[in-house]
Image (tube, helix red, strand yellow):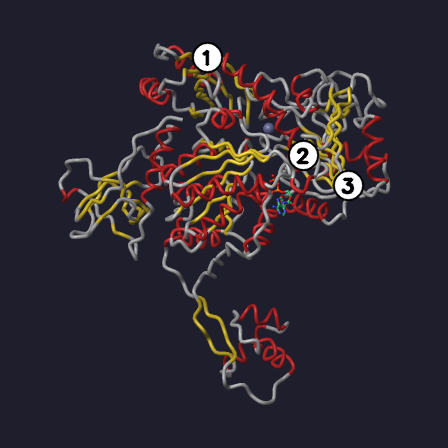
Amino acid sequence: MKDAALKPALALGPAPRAGVLLPFPLPGPYDYKLPSGMEVSRGLLVTAPLGPRESLGVVWGEAEGAVGDNRLRLAVPLEGEPVLPADLCDFVDWVADYTLTPKGLVLAMALRSRQALMAESPRTAYALGPALPAKLTLPRRRIADLMKDGLVRSAASIAEEANVGAGVVRGLIAAGALVPVAMPEFAPVPRPDADFARAVLSLDQEAAARSLKAQIASRRFAVSLLDGVTGSGKTETYFEAVAEALRQNRQVLILLPEIALTVQFLDRFSERFGVRPAEWHSDLSQRERRRIWRAVLRGEARVVVGARSALFLPFAELGLVVVDEEHEQAYKQEEGPIYHARDMAVVRARLAKCPVVLASATPSLESYVNATGGRYAHLKLPRRHNNATMPEVRLVDLTRERGEPGTFLSPPLRDALARTLGAGEQAMLFLNRRGYAPLTLCEACGHKMTCPHCAAWLVEHRYRSRLICHHCGFDTAVPAHCPQCATPSSLIACGPGVERVAEEFALAFPTARVAIASSDTLQGPDETQAAIRAMNKRETDVLIGTQIVAKGHHFPQLTLVGVVDADLGGSDGDLRARERTFQLLHQVSGRAGRADKPGLVLIQTRNPKDAVMQALVMSDRDAFYAQERLMRERAQAPPFGRLAAIILSGVQGDAVREAGRLLARSAPAARGVKVWGPTPAFYALLRGQTRERLLVQAERSVDIQAYLRTWLGRVHLANAVRLSLDIDPVSFF
Ligand code: ADP
Ligand code: ZN
């Protein structure tokens, strides 16, 4: 990443005018008048007229234009004159410049809760009053008994908790037996207690924690890679850093790659700190969003656990940022402003002048190179907690060990499952494929069932008896006849998905309790959570899952992990495909044998000699990284070079392809820059849109943003074509 010059936080003084940034796709601030005599500073939240409407806006800097005051419209500060922290404003500028996104759109991410700044509307609650009649009907008696504890409650919760009708509550209010009490609109956010339940750290953990604590105390920007094997206590270790930040009266942001991981995490956090942290992710209600946003701005929320978008919360006293499972691709935001939350977390910390911790057992090659090269502190936890041993990893060569046709669990894997279940232990089967079968094919003519809107196969979901497109959600019943040759009952399922593995497992082990956890939009996050909880409570013997089960979870009784198909997604020419396969398989292996019983991992593959498979068997992560690093260095691929992707899309295929050619022709020649394409994207048709891609490859020293600005500034594309830019792309679809 390139360092951009930072603007100092502006104190504009008693300025009658200022540049105000509005949360819309606008390239920069607009000039407005402000009430005269006001002290105006950067970050001040205002309402500003925009056309016929009023919009929320933020004072961004000095006014630009020479337009007379009488032509400017008036922006009015919000009540209480709230101000966005200056480093958040700087962050918005930085992200916009780096990702080439209009500033207003990035600001919109920081103002995700539009109503957050509206005045609070107090609620009315009720307490037991003095005028309680001596003789009470039974329902009234129940209310009186309930309210004797002295707590105040809303009318609705009194009715619910006392199990009486709303009319009974109204009657007691009218009689003066229940008296109204004004309550703030939002329940306060509880404060975590740094010393609630401190862990006794191992020597390695202690050393890492000490280093982090020193960074927090010195209040300087520093990046650490917390590089610890699975089960080594990375969470426990950075919790000590969190505790230190709390003691120093600083706020903490912890990023997790997926909401699905948060439930276990919240419980763990509250065991350590006494209360749950504030949460921030896309599943929050508007009200909750409003509550947390203002609590963060006012410094009442001390620790926030969230997904990518939590980076844009208005922390006033940020003292520590943690990015857990930092290698996760889920940190890349692929829609709207395209950005990598791990990289932006580092920027956020730099602007806030605080330390940031990147934690992983399988770091991204980028972070690994930075840590081994000395740019980041490299904090290592080489051993599992409590002397738990690392699991033994064995390969099952599928070219030799074949079961019956149409089955996917090889004899060695079945034997291992039988032994594990016999010993009363738990197992996990991992397959990164949702549904029943990835492909449905006509036996008679070979016709493949594909999505009408996407260049992709339809995936059979047998529980719902549907064929579904995983890209656009299109779904259809499995037809009785082949749509091409009309042969009846000719469609067959090809290849396994988790549902099919579950079916095969249940046939082989009819008494075992089995659950599926899949990152499926069809199977909601609640069901996934339920499957994970059941596994924790040992109500499940075997968990069959997609990548959702690979990460972060700690199941003490899990001793066997079976990888059903390790060759999936290994060789699609994507520069990170090998790294990702390694990370995923290593992570999933790391679920085995985390407590006192040793773990076994069986990996089914058709390529047992492949370097990724060998690194897994030999448990030689660093050898794999060394090789990967060399390959990237030779190819001048990231982090040794820069990449940016240009994606063109639109419903008119010809217009999109023409735009691609036009762009390629107008690419300026520049030293150290190569432009590839246009080529049809991997999914050349997605949700009805034709897609073409160009890739810019540049040497590290090149300012790739400046190059793109110059280039794209010269070209006018047809309106029917949408252009999106992906700086540092991680997916090449
Ligand atoms: P990682 O995140 O590195 O995979 P965790 O932090 O999940 O590892 O730790 C694995 C398990 O070991 C967890 O159950 C955790 O509570 C426990 N553990 C790790 N370190 C300690 C410690 N110092 N004291 C008590 N329990 C610990
Ligand atoms: Zn589709």
Dividing the picture into quadrants, the one containing residue 57 is top left
Q: Which residue is mark 1?
A: 676
Contact, mark 1 vs mark 2 (Cβ under 8 Å):
no
Instruction: Work out which quarter of the rendered image holds the C terminus and state it.
Output: top right
Q: How far across and down, in percent of the image, does residue 299 sit?
A: 40, 53
Using the numbered discs, state the Cα–Cα distance from disc 1 to disc 2 in whole angstroms: 39 Å
Q: Which residue is mark 3?
A: 426
Which badge, 3 or 2, comes first in the chain's sequence? 3
Using the numbered discs, state the Cα–Cα distance from disc 1 to disc 3 in whole angstroms: 49 Å
Which badge, 1 or 3, comes first in the chain's sequence? 3
**Ligand 2 within 8 Å, label 1 CB:** no
**Ligand 1 within 8 Å, label 2 CB:** yes
Instruction: Work out which quarter of the rendered image holds the N terminus and state it.
Output: top left
Residue 136 numbered tag: none
Visible in this render: residue 42?
A: yes
* Ligand 2 position by quadrant: top right
**Ligand 1 within 8 Å, label 3 CB:** no
Taking the view exactly as shown, the residue that stands out farthest to the front is 203
Q: Amino acid at mark 2?
A: Gly
Q: Amino acid at mark 1?
A: Trp
Measuring 78% from the left and 20% from the top, which residue is drawn there? 398
- Give the mark toward the camera: 3 or 2: 2
How would you rate the neighbour count of disc 2 (Cα within 10 Å): few for under 14, some for 14-19, many for 20 or more? many
How would you rate the neighbour count of disc 1 (Cα within 10 Å): few for under 14, some for 14-19, many for 20 or more? few
- Give the mark toward the camera: 1 or 2: 2
Q: Amino acid at mark 3?
A: Gln
Residue 590 numbered tag: 2
Q: How far across and down, in percent of the image, does residue 147 sit?
A: 57, 76
Dividing the picture into quadrants, the one containing residue 684 is top right
In depth, the one of 30 and 317 nearer the eye is 317
In depth, the one of 10 and 694 nearer the eye is 10
